[in-house]
Amino acid sequence: MDFIAIAALAATGWVVGATAIALAVGRSIKLRDQSDWTFSARPVLSRRR
């Protein structure tokens, strides 16, 4: 029981940390230049399709 509880807490903490980092990176990219981000993302999306 203790191991499961510790593993659950570690998993939730990792998810929260990952989402916080993702939000910080997304904000920094938007603050730099939104137009450059959209233009750079379009060819990548078209290549995946």
Image (tube, rainbow, N blue to C red):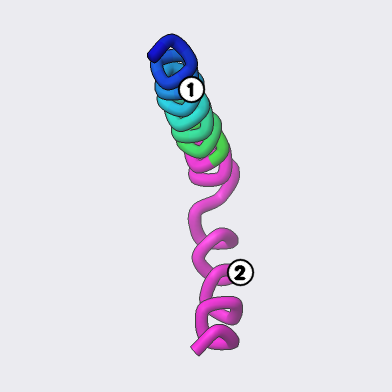
Residue 7 falls within the magenta-colored stretch: no
Point 49% across, 54% down: residue: 34
Asked if the magenta segment contains residue 30, the reply would be: yes
Camera-nearest residue between 4 and 16: 4
Viewer-side label of 2, 1: 1
Taking depth in this image into account, of 4 and 15 the one nearest to the observer is 4
- Asked whether, in this view, residue 17 is left or right of residue 40, the answer is left
At horizontal 54% and vertical 31% (from top left) the residue drawn is 21
- Residue 20 vs 48, above or below: the answer is above
Quarter containing the N terminus: top left
Which mark identifies residue 40? Answer: 2
**Foreground pick, 4 / 34:** 4
Residue 9 screen position, x and y as percent: 43, 17
Magenta region, residue range = 26-49
Label 2 to label 1, Cα distance in Å?
38 Å
Q: Mark 1 points at which residue?
A: 7
Residues packed near mark 1 inside 10 Å, few (<14), some (14 to 19) or many (20 plus): few
Residue 12 image position (x, y, % from top left): 41, 25
Residue 2 point in image, percent of width and height:
43, 10
Residue 28 found in image quarter: top right
